[in-house]
Amino acid sequence: MDWRIFKGLIIGILIVAFSSYGIDDFSDPGESNIKWVNSNDFISTSFSGGQCKITNTEPSGEIFGYIRHSISGTKPSTFTISTEVVSSSSSNLGGIVFCLQPGQGFEGYALYIDNGNIVVLKFLENSGSEIVFNALSSYLKPENNEIVISKDGSLFNIFINGEFEGTFTDSQYSTGDIGLFSPGNSEVVYQYVTMENTFRPHEPISYFYDNFESGKLPGWVKHGEADVRVDDGQLKVNTLDDTNATLYYRNITVENFVAAVEVSHRGGANNSSYGLLLLGEEKDILFPIVGGRLYSAGFLGELLDYSSSQVIRGAPYDDGGSYYYYTDTLMIQKEEGSQEYKFMVNGQHLTSFTTTDFDVTGVGLFIGHDLELYFDNFGVAEGNELNPPVSITRRRISGRGGVIRGNQPSATFDLRGRRIGEKGVNQIIPELSPSGVYINNHEGRKIRLR
């Protein structure tokens, strides 16, 4: 969707001062009319039966608006805002606008729900917008969805229907006014809006496992524009038509841990990186491989030195139109008392990355540009054990999209990289020499790693 904002439509928003906390249960239409101001002339608001209906008549559906409530006195920098979206006439269920800055333009954040995705956009004056949070929610209902955004400093927590959805950090705006979101060409009904000057924490988790059999992605957060879907018990990510990398991760707090995932390179570039990612407060650590059977480790966005290894299976092998697809098991392990993060592929320790004062806030996947990847059995756990075991199987397919022949040799490892059984010998493909390895940083700028 093209989020062109207001397209010259904002002509002097009146700011109405009002005592804020509690904000509105919409039980008194006359009082509610005083509390809220429409952002644009295509926005209209009505109050009835303890509900607020916002109508956006902008015909293209591409320009949203909001109704604004001005907070009098000192605006809190620590807060929790809650609302209930009763219904919406479109796939966009509406949401909360917060940290709105004074003036005629739109500066602040907007949290909205569109096609099941929880999205937070940050709007900068005269500079457009950028996505700071994107997650496919598993907690939404057809109607009557409670949305909560809670802020403490630069930390934001998001809850949907009482369930923790995810977190993000941003320090652009510390406080401001609030509003209710109005998607283009739609009607959205809200039940109430409350605001407290308190922070709602979430219970940190230290274990997470997903075999993608549910068909949903509870708790996962996406940054990037890749095509992501869950199908046949696998997470399938496609960046073939996108020049930007994608980060896909789960908020989790671990200190001494093991993390692992199975990944199969199904198509695209042999010199584009992908792998496991550790998120931190200020920097992220990347443990990538490439289809050309190279590996590295280091801070995301910095120049990385890659080395080759035949342990990595990598990209598919084209045998005259029959394709051999391979699965690699990637694992990171950090032991108690150590600052070393060991990177293992298919049970073999390939490299380590050592750093101090790094607190893990999330573990996830990095997918570079021009790739088609299948992921399975993603797991993270505090300590040195993570079950169930992961099976690594060589698969031969007659042409792309053909039928897998099931009698192929395989080897099985647990998520600590220990071989459980041997059922054949893995074929070694001659090493490919890529012309370069690239990632794209958060600004979409391509960075050459090698």
Image (spheres, rainbow, N blue to C red):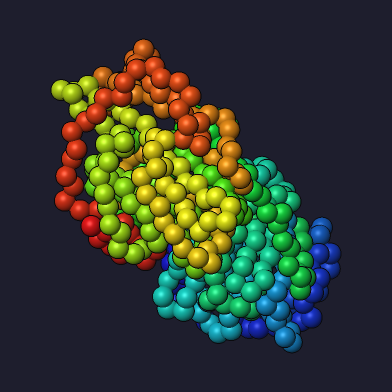
* x 18%, y 23%: residue: 319
Q: Nearer the viewer, residue 41 or 408?
A: 408
Q: Nearer the viewer, residue 181 or 189?
A: 181
Q: Position of residue 79 (x, y in %)?
A: 72, 71
Q: How many numbered marks, from 0 up?
A: 0
Furthest-front residue in view? 337
Q: Position of residue 437 (x, y in %)?
A: 25, 53
Q: Is residue 229 left or right of residue 406?
A: right
Q: Is residue 91 visible?
A: no
Q: Is residue 262 left or right of residue 218?
A: left
Q: Nearer the viewer, residue 308 or 25?
A: 308
* x 40%, y 23%: residue: 411
The answer to which image quadrant residue 315 occupies is top left
Q: Is residue 249 depicted above or below 283 in this figure?
A: above
> Which image quarter is the N terminus in?
bottom left
Q: Is residue 425 depicted above or below 162 in this figure?
A: above
Q: Is residue 144 depicted above or below 298 in this figure?
A: above
Q: Position of residue 201 (x, y in %)?
A: 72, 61
Q: Position of residue 429 (x, y in %)?
A: 21, 30
> Which image quarter is the C terminus in?
bottom left
* x 68%, y 65%: residue: 150
Furthest-right residue in view? 27
Q: Is residue 339 visible?
A: yes
Q: Nearer the viewer, residue 136 or 256?
A: 256
Q: Is residue 396 left or right of residue 32?
A: left
Furthest-top residue in view? 407
